Image (tube, rainbow, N blue to C red):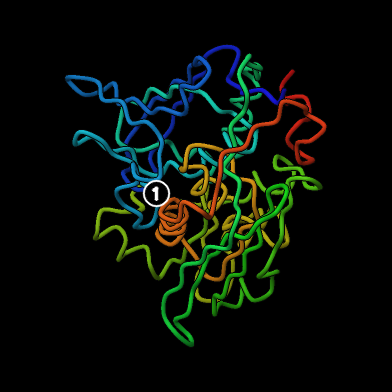
Amino acid sequence: MLEQRTIQTLTRAVGMGLHSGQRVEMTLHPAPADTGIVFRRIDLPEPVQIPITAQAVVDTRMASTIGAQGAKVHTVEHLMSALCGLGIDNIVIDITAEEVPILDGSSSSFVFLLQSAGVQLQKAPKKFIRILQPVEVREGEGQQLKWARFEPYHGFKLRFEIDFAHPAVDNTGQSFEFDWASGDYSRDIARARTFGFTRDVEMLRTNGLALGGGLDNAIVMDDYKVLNSDGLRYDDEFVKHKILDAIGDLYLIGHPILGAYSAFRSGHAMNNQLLRALQAQENAWEWATFTDTRQAPPGFSAAPLGW
């Protein structure tokens, strides 16, 4: 049987929110089978639990924000990406502020935290959402066109294409495909950092965003070049970060997906629209489990990292 996973022991992180600039403490707890992923705002007079679902997403401006009972947690996508990358099904995340810490702007610190805590197999079948029919969402035309789609595929594959008219981005790969069967999430995707432009910083901060952003947790560019002294971690770090974000956004459906995702200029909002469009078409997906691990797609049945 392909089993669910949690972490073996609790682990903690302290950092700053990318947009809020607030100091935040986060504690990740093991959770029983079939718990799912649950965020818990413990700084409030009465703690509020926010279970992960596509419908829990309440804002997608610059990040994916989840909410329940008036409480919110911003910028969950990098942590969600790491949880998906290591196959974690069940975990409770206590957080002392309204935003997940940005750490280094990628998922690699979260991967390290999870691996340090250890990965625990659980005596319950891992539940997948298997794509049966194509589902697509689109917006705009011509230069404003953007789209995202799911198609059937025995595994999990993502292809993303970006389109930024900027010299530093144009000099890198603007499309990338990552397949769970042949790729290594920790090596190939997790280290890709979020990025932004100095020309946008003033506007963002006027609107209360990017208050915690800087060269230590993002790739920053002026009108011509990357300003980080250490340069890029990957030759195609920009598009790889968009795939990192997409992995996290799609895991907000609450279960791993079996299918192929492809996108052009998509973002947090469109990724969530795609999840909701999928769930609205009952004949486009089904639940899947694997009693025989040999029938599971490659990449999902390997021994959990961190052992």
Q: Position of residue 203 (x, y in %)?
A: 30, 66
Nearest to the observer: residue 54 or residue 226: 54
Q: Position of residue 230 (x, y in %)?
A: 66, 53
Q: Is residue 127 left or right of residue 27?
A: right
Locate the N terminus and report the quarter of the image it occupies: top right
Q: Is residue 10 left or right of residue 41?
A: right
Q: Is residue 281 visible?
A: yes
Eyeballing the image, is 32 above or below 291? above
- For disc 1, the marked residue is 64
The residue drawn where x is 44% and y is 22% is 92
Locate the C terminus and report the quarter of the image it occupies: top right
Q: For numbered disc 1, what is the local secondary structure?
A: loop
Q: Can residue 231 be seen in this view?
A: no
The residue drawn where x is 45% and y is 56% is 281
The residue drawn where x is 24% and y is 60% is 206
Eyeballing the image, is 243 above or below 72? below
Identify the residue at the far bottom of this view.
Answer: 142
Type of residue at label 1? Ser
Q: Where is residue 30 in the image (x, y as percent from the top left)?
A: 52, 15
Eyeballing the image, is 271 above or below 248? below
Classed neighbour count for the residue bearing mark 1: other residues with Cα under 10 Å, few (<14), some (14–19), many (≥20): many
The residue drawn where x is 52% and y is 42% is 251
Q: Is residue 29 left or right of residue 69?
A: right
Q: Where is residue 237 in the image (x, y as percent from the top left)?
A: 65, 58
